[in-house]
Image (spheres, rainbow, N blue to C red):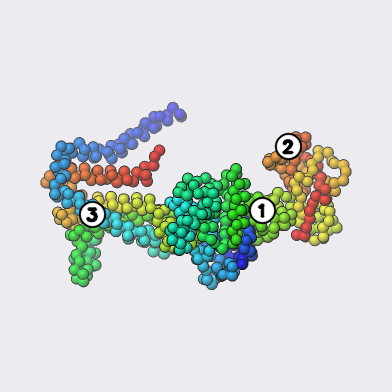
Amino acid sequence: MDARRPSARSLLLVPVGLAVALLALPLVGLLARAPWSRLADRLASGAVLDALRLSILSSTGAALASLVLGLPLALWLSQGRSPWRTTVRLLVVLPMVLPPVVGGVALLLAFGRAGVIGAPLERVFGLSLPFSGAGVVLAATWVSLPFFVLSAEAGLRAFDPRFAAAAASLGAGPWRTFRTVTLPMIAPSLRAGLLLAWARALGEFGATITFAGNLEGTTRTLPLAVYTALETAPEAAIALSLLLVAISALVLFLLRDRWFPVG
Amino acid sequence: MSLVADFTLARGDFALEFAATVERGETLALVGPNGAGKSSCLQALGGLIPIDAGSVELDGRQLERGGSRQSLAPDQRRVGFVFQDLLLFPHLSVVENVAYGPRSRGLDRRSARSRATEWLERVGLSEFAERRPGELSGGQAQRVALARALACEPALLLLDEPLSAVDASARAELRRELRQHLDAFDGVRLIVAHDAIDAFALADRVAVLEGGRVVQTGTTPQICGHPRSTYVADLVGLNLFRGTASAGHLSLPGGAELVVASVPDGPTLAVLHPRAVALFRERPQGSPRNVWRSTVAAVEPAIDRLRVRFDAPVPLVAEVTHGAAQELGLGPGAALWIAVKATEISAYSG
C-alpha cells in the first residue's frame, strides 16, 4: 500500500498543473506581450492619468460609502433578531452573483432620468446620477458593498461579546463600549473588508459602462479605458492592464496577513 | 451596608434560586459542581443576565426587581467584575486596561491614568504598564484584571474563579496576595471558587450551590465539620453517611448499620475522615465497634497516600500509606476487614 502512495500523489499533480497553468498563463501572455520599452510613454498620457485618477477616486468613494452604509448593516445582521434578516442577507449577496451589466440596467431603471427614483430626484433637486462621476461611485458601491458587509459581519460574529460585558461592568455605556472595545477589536476585519470593496470597485466594468457610460474624463475608469483602447490601440490596452495588475498585486500584499498566514 | 439578594432566574432547562445577604467587608464564596449556577449567579448580580423574580439590593439601592423592568444597566451598578477568562482588552496596554473604568466613569485622561498607575503599583506591576495583555503571564494578567476591577471603586466585587488561569506553582502566592487585596477592599466581595482551598482561604463564609439552589451556607469550620451533601463532603475530603439514628445506631439506606458515639434519634448525617478507617487482612481483635468485611472497588493515588474505595456494604474511602498498602496486598478485588471506632464518626442532625 505504501509503495503506491507516491504514484497516487504524482497522479494528483496532473490536474494541479492544469489548474495552475489556467491561472498563470493569461498573466504570462500579458507580461510576454507587454511593450516594456514604451511602457512609460504609454502610461504617461493625459487620458491614462485621467482614467487612473477617476478609478482611484471612485473606488475610494465606493469603499467609504460601503463603510458608512455597510457597518450599521453588518451590525444589524450580526445581532438583530428581525425575521427580515434572511431576506436582507439575500439582498446583500445579490450583487455578488448577479451579472454586473444586469445591475447596471437595474440601476438605470431606478436612478436613471426616467427611473423610479431618478425622475423625482431630477425634478425636485435637479440631480442626475447616470453618466456622471457620482453615477460611477453609485455603480461601484452597488457591486462592492457585499464584500465589505460580509467581511465586517464575519468580524462582528467572531467578536466575543463578553468583552463588551467587561466594558459595561467597568462603567462604559453601549456607545463607548462600541467605540473603544468592539470597533478596535474588529478593526482587522473592517480593514480587509475595505480593501476588498476597494479592489472590487476598481475592477468594476459592466455596471459602470451600463449606468454611467464611457465618457472620457468623467466616467471612463481604468477597466473602461482598457476596453476602449483594445479596439484602437492594443499596446495601450496592455499597458493599462499591467497597471491594474500592479495595483491588484499591491492589494494582495496588503491582505497578506489575513489570507496567507505563514506556514 | 450590604448586598441583599433574593432572586430566581430560568435560562432554558436551568433554574437558579439564590438568596444571600453579604455584609460590607465580608467575602462570600460560592462553591458547587459544574453547572450548579455559580457563574449565572454572578452574572445576574452584575446585571449581565436578567432575573425573573425577586430583587437585588446593594447598600440600600435597588439594582433590580424581577419582572418589573426596573433594572440598572451593568454600567450603572458600581459592580466590579473579575471574569474567569479575565477578558483584558487585547488592543489596550496594561495601564489603559486599568484606566478604562475610571475613564468610563468620567475621569479625565490624566487622572484616570494616574489612578491606574497607582493600582498597578499596588499589585506590583508598575514596570508592565506599557505591555499588552498578551505579553503577561497568567498570574500577572490576573493581577491586572483585579486592578482593573478595583480601580472603578465598586461597591460590590465579583470574582469568577479568579485563580483558574494561574499555574499551580504561582497559585499559593497569588492566593495570599488576593486575600490581602480583598481584605483591603471595603465593599461586598463575592467569589466563585472551584477549589476548596481557594474558597476557604479567601472567604469568610461559603455558600454551597447544587442544582441551582443554595444547599448550605456557613463559615469554614461549619462547612468542613458538618457537610450537608456528598459534594461538600468530597470537597473537604470526608466520607459522608446519610441515615436514620436510633439508640446510638445509624441505619444506612443499604441496610448496613454503624455504631456512633452520641447522636439524637432521627434523620442524621455523619462524617468520617478517610484516615480514621483502619484496614486489616485478618479480623481485628479489640475495641473497634464497627467491623465488617468488604472488597476493594478501586485504588487511587493521592499526594502521599492511596485512597481505597469500597462500595458495599458501606460505601466509603479509606486512606492508607504506601507501606501499609504493600503489607495488605492492596488492589481491586482484594477482600479486607474494615474497622472504624465509634468515636471517629461525627454525627449531626440531617
Q: Picture coordinates of residue A83 (x, y %)?
A: 41, 64
In the shown orientation, is residue B195 left or right of residue B117? right
Label 3 to label 1: alpha-carbon separation: 66 Å
- The image shows residue B20, relative to residue A42, as above or below, that is below
Q: Earlier in the sequence, mark 2 or mark 1?
A: 1
Q: Chain of mark 2?
A: B
Q: Chain of mark 3?
A: A
Residue B31 vs residue B165, the one in the foreground:
B165
In the shown orientation, is residue B350 left or right of residue B163? right
Q: Residues at marks 3 and 1, common chain?
A: no
Q: Picture coordinates of residue A140 (x, y %)?
A: 25, 56
Q: Give the secondary structure at mark 1.
A: helix
Residue B203 vs residue A93, the one in the foreground:
B203
Does the CB distance between marks 3 and 2 fall below 8 Å?
no
Q: Which residue is mark 3?
A: A57
Q: Amino acid at mark 2?
A: His
Q: Give the secondary structure at mark 2.
A: helix
- The residue sitting at 24% across, 67% down in the picture is A117
Q: Which residue is mark 1?
A: B200
